[in-house]
Image: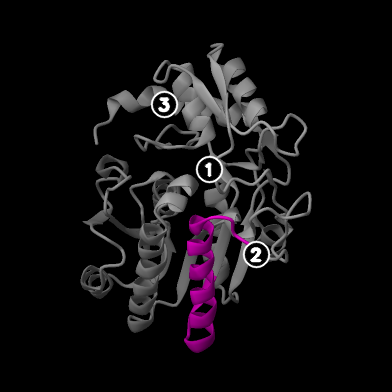
Amino acid sequence: MTVLVTGGAGYIGGHMVLALRDAGEAVVVVDDLSTGFRWAVPSDVTFYQGDFGDQTLMQQVLTAHKVDAIAHFAAKIVVPESVADPLGYYRNNTSSARNLLEMAVRHAVPHMIFSSTAAVYGEPDVEAVSELEATNPMSPYGRSKLMVEWMLEDTARAHDFAYVALRYFNVAGADPQGRHGQSALNATHLIKRAVQTALGRYPYMEVFGTDFATPDGTGVRDYIQITDLIAAHMRALAYLRRGGQSLVCNCGYGHGASVLEVIAAVKKVSGVNFEVRLSPRRAGDPARLIARAERARERFGWVPQHDNLDDIVRQALDWERRLHNHQR
């Protein structure tokens, strides 16, 4: 059988493709290359360039391949951009996902792993948020992802279909073997932007918000290393294939680092004392998001192996240095 990876030329989806190949799985990728890179997909992986919401394309893909699971990563992910362009986010993240789900049901694809987000929680009142916490997204990005979770839940009730929705906290780092990393040209991820600044690609690092109710006034996030995140996906896939029921799980380490702490780690690892400028908060940014992720450990045996901020920063820095060897 074959695993279809939407967004498989991107950061997280690309790492999933590598993990599936390492495990001997057959893989097919659909990506429109709006933020992904063709070179990121190995040459022996079947690739279709196009929109995952294009039902004509998905008809072609699902007819040509015996797909037993879809790992769905393709999405717009920038919170401030979603505030400025909500309809674009609902079209791409939600409407297109509805089209993909319809094609999955039509072709009797039994399993889906969905790339969701901690943004569905909004700004919870607890120190660390569990899957039982109420959802209250603060941005169209978070709402667009939560809507997909609702569609998955309803689809699983109505059809022979099961899913795992993984709510990511802040994904960072790169493949320890150096095969892939965060490569988007204008990525807004904090660690990527900070290592780019350390390498001189930006003249200074901008910090958005210094008046949050956190120890140093900057936002606190739970940074999960990409290989650990993908290990959760592989565990989820095995769980579904064993007949596991639909599930929503957090993916994080259960502790956080502030923006200033991350910047300090980048300065230490890179040896570069770059300029930092302080700016007002951005719309839609909560003060703190930290995971409780016991469910993933208990339900499908996920055991993180790479919980070290300095190592995560070092991987991101090493990958950024490699990027000049690649072409879009």
Q: Which residues are magenta?
A: 135-163
Query: Of tags 2 and 1, which is closer to the observer?
Result: 2
- At x 54%, y 77%, the residue is 153
- Side of 320 where 304 appears, left or right: right
- Please state which amino acid type lies under the numbered disc 1: Ile
Residue 151 lies in the magenta stretch? yes
Residue 90, above or below 197: below
Q: Nearer the viewer, residue 165 or 276?
A: 276
Residue 70: numbered disc: none
Q: Nearer the viewer, residue 65 or 83?
A: 83
Placement of the C terminus among the 4 image quadrants = top left
Residue 309 lies in the magenta stretch? no
- Residue 1 position by quadrant: bottom left
Residue 114 location in percent, x, y?
49, 63
Please report contact status of discs 2 and 1: CB closer than 8 Å, yes or no: no
Residue 283 location in percent, x, y?
55, 45
Residue 22 location in percent, x, y?
43, 49
- At x 38%, y 81%, the residue is 105
Residue labelled with disc 2: 135
Residue labelled with disc 1: 226
Label 2 crowd bin: few (<14), some (14–19), many (20+), radius 10 Å: some
State which tag comes first along the sequence, 3 or 2. 2
Residue labelled with disc 3: 320
Question: Mark 3 to mark 1: distance in Å?
Answer: 15 Å
State which tag comes first along the sequence, 2 or 1. 2
Q: Is residue 1 visible?
A: no
